[in-house]
Image (cartoon, rainbow, N blue to C red):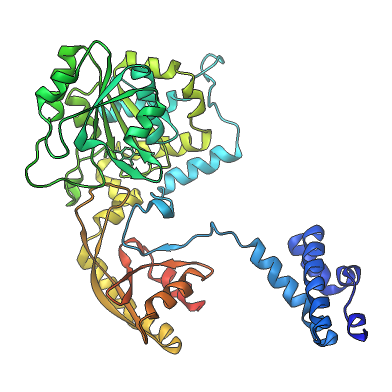
Amino acid sequence: MDGFRALPSVDQVLLSPAGAALIAGHGRASVREALRARLDEMRDAIRAGEDGAVLAARLPDLVGADLAARARTRLRPMLNLTGTVLHTNLGRAILADEAVRAAVVAMANPLALEFDLETGGRGQRDDHLRGLLVELTGAEDATVVNNNAAAVLIALNTLAQGREAVVSRGELIEIGGAFRMPDIMARAGAKLVEVGTTNRTHPRDYQDAITPGTGVILKVHTSNYRIEGFTAEVPAPQLSLIAREARVPLVNDLGAGSLVDLSAWGLTREPTVAEAVAEGADLVTFSGDKLLGGPQAGFIVGRRDLIAAINRNPLKRAVRLDKIRIAALEATLRLYRDPDRLAERLPTLRMLARPAAEIAAQAARLAPKIHVLLEPLGFAAAPCGCASQTGSGALPVDTLPSAGLRLTGQGGDAPDRLAAKLRALPCPVIGHIHDGALILDLRCLDDDQALISALTAL
Ligand SMILES: *Cc1c(COP(=O)(O)O)cnc(C)c1O
């Protein structure tokens, strides 16, 4: 029983210098709780025959480690070296400095979110973005919601609740998670009318399906896969004529929806939002945090009367944006007014457009330094070629030639063991396993030193 007497009481520790230091860092209540938990464990250990004095000596350090572990957020910054630039699980787009600054100002201050600074009367929160969106897309009007899934949901609900929504079988996509086009349609209250076949849909398929009960024709950009071979789809301009003739609105869900022609930066051409508008869609929906490179948001641009109807839908209030994202979006959209400097200022575009030769030079430069850090742990690093992806369903089939580090070690489980070590770092480093090695694609690494510092903690 003497063993128990070697343990201090909770209050004794709280009053000691070590306790005071812990309280300064974590607060009295948390320290007390952590001490109680460790002391309970130690009493059990003493009953099992361990030495109380030895345990007591370790108490402050153990409690300190417990509290530090609990204080460490899982949302800490990490290095995305997966090769997927817009990685949904890693938070998609990194914002431009201009957008980050605007978000910080919005977080810390009152601002005229729904307040007209000229008249002192009530303003509209969407007005901050409407003008820019109209300017950048050529649409008559625009509205903004929580994400593109919400944009599709509210557009369908507004136009086709209790009515039919006509869509090609080749476009009934699942985006990931629980976002499947047929399910969203059902939740929007629309009755799905599938036309055509998986690989081929013709104009007459749409024409035959349209009835007086049709509320909308939906065209969906098949963003995360591509059907190849014997295929046919009805191009948007032709579909818009069919829709107009039948007096049914056409909604084109672009998904990634770029505001600029990416071929200017050597990337594969994606249809731009302005093109989709010009092709005659009545509404076009797209995401804020995919190719656009902003925070999570969903945009709906198009006919003024339809946008007004969407804004009157009570669902709009449930899917509206907060001031922080509106501020960040405004700053992001402003960057598009100067396309010449866009790749400099917008991280998503900068990373996508990085020349492979520049990344290869970075890999050659970093490989010996990283090798030196890994060698004592039994791993080796060498430069390698690899292939990046845009991610988030944008440009699904195209890969971008890239370069990185190929990390190898002894044993078949070496890549997994190393990947686990890198995930546990104070600044986690995430790569991907390929062909018996852990590959760190350097496309998204702006700063060599960031990787060296992160790995030094090994
Ligand atoms: C990504 C995507 C969505 C969903 O957009 P979120 O912004 O992720 O909600 C919807 N439709 C298409 C075609 C997409 O590619």
Considering the image in quadrants, where does the N terminus appear? bottom right
Q: Is 82 left or right of 197, judged from the image as shown?
A: right
Which residue is at a point 37% across and 87% down the rendered structure image?
A: 410
Q: Residue furthest left?
A: 230
The answer to whether residue 152 shows anywhere in this view is no
The answer to whether residue 323 shows anywhere in this view is yes
- Residue 162 position (above or below residue 20): above
Which sits in the foreground, 317 or 355? Answer: 317
In the figure, residue 141 lies in which quadrant? Answer: top left
Taking the image in four quarters, ligand 1 sits in the one at top left
- Residue 20 position (above or below residue 137): below
Q: Position of residue 135 (x, y in %)?
A: 29, 27
> Could you tell me how many numbered marks the image carries?
0
Which sits in the foreground, 190 or 139? Answer: 190
Which sits in the foreground, 84 or 342? Answer: 84
Which residue is at a point 24% across and 55% down the rendered structure image?
A: 353
Q: Position of residue 186 (x, y in %)?
A: 38, 28
Q: Position of residue 288 (x, y in %)?
A: 37, 39
- Residue 114 position (above or below residue 445): above
Q: Position of residue 338 (x, y in %)?
A: 28, 39
In the figure, residue 99 lies in which quadrant? Answer: top left
Which residue is at a point 52% across and 37% down the rendered structure image?
A: 324
Q: Is 15 left or right of 92, judged from the image as shown?
A: right
Which residue is at a point 48% across and 32% down the rendered structure image?
A: 321
Q: Is 33 left or right of 373, judged from the image as shown?
A: right
